[in-house]
Image (cartoon, grey):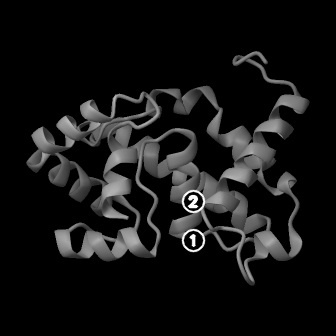
């Protein structure tokens, strides 16, 4: 598969992988529209958004880099994914969109119920947006030494800063 210009077959495979990832993260339970009336192809548009060259710089972005253009790009990415799922008549919750962003680019945490509850105890805004990202930057910078030590001891390139912070809040 070419990273520069993936084929439609490659994009379909990525959409299927995104579907499986989301199912493993609880997004295909109960009465969820994804489970009730959508095939994996509902994610094709999301894959096309995420693989856009414009968002490559967000890959594993550290919370310390939440400023200026970076923070605007994360919000832009969220908004594009939100609009994509809204057009597909899938409820574009903070949980769904942030799980997609965490699982693909790793530049934000997944704002599910457990994480949001823990964030509340830490004084971090629970609703995705500029305030949440700025709060996460402050939280990370206040706890940088401890977080970076944990990330280093895990010694797994897949477990970057925000994945580790997400797991700790879960």
- Residue 112 drawn above or below residue 155: below
Rendering coords of residue 143 (x, y %): 12, 48
- Residue 61 drawn above or below residue 34: above
Pointer 2 and pointer 1: residues touching (CB < 8 Å)?
yes
Is residue 134 visible to us here?
yes
Q: Hey, which quadrant is residue 115 in on the image?
A: bottom left
Rendering coords of residue 72 (x, y %): 40, 45
Is residue 77 visible to us here?
no
- The single residue placed furthest to the bottom in the displayed view is 31
Circle 1 sits on which residue?
Answer: 93
Residue at figure coordinates x 18%, y 36% from the top left: 149
Q: Front-most of 148 and 37?
A: 148
Q: Hey, which quadrant is residue 145 in on the image?
A: top left
Estimate how packed mark 1 is, as few (under 14), some (14 to 19) or many (20 or more) residues with alpha carbons within 10 Å.
some
Q: Classify residue 84 as left or right of residue 63.
A: right
Q: Classify residue 132 as left or right of residue 27.
A: left
Q: Classify residue 108 as left or right of residue 121.
A: right
Q: Tag 1's secondary structure?
A: loop
Circle 2 sits on which residue?
Answer: 97
Residue at figure coordinates x 66%, y 51% from the top left: 21
């Amino acid at each position: 598969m070419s990273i520069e210009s993936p084929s439609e077959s490659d994009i379909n495979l990525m959409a299927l992988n995104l579907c499986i990832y989301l199912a493993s993260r609880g997004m295909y339970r109960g009465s969820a529209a994804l489970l009730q009336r959508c095939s994996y192809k509902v994610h094709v548009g999301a894959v096309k958004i995420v693989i856009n060259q414009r968002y490559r710089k967000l890959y594993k972005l550290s919370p310390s880099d939440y400023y200026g253009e970076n923070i605007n790009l994360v919000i832009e990415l969220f908004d594009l994914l939100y609009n994509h799922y809204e057009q597909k008549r899938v409820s574009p919750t903070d949980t769904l969109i942030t799980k997609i962003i965490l699982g693909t680019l790793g530049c934000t945490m997944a704002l599910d119920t457990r994480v949001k509850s823990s964030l509340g105890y830490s004084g971090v805004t629970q609703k995705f947006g500029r305030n949440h990202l700025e709060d996460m930057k402050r939280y990370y910078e206040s706890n940088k030494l401890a977080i970076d030590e944990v990330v280093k001891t895990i010694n797994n390139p897949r477990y970057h800063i925000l994945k580790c912070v997400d797991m700790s809040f879960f």
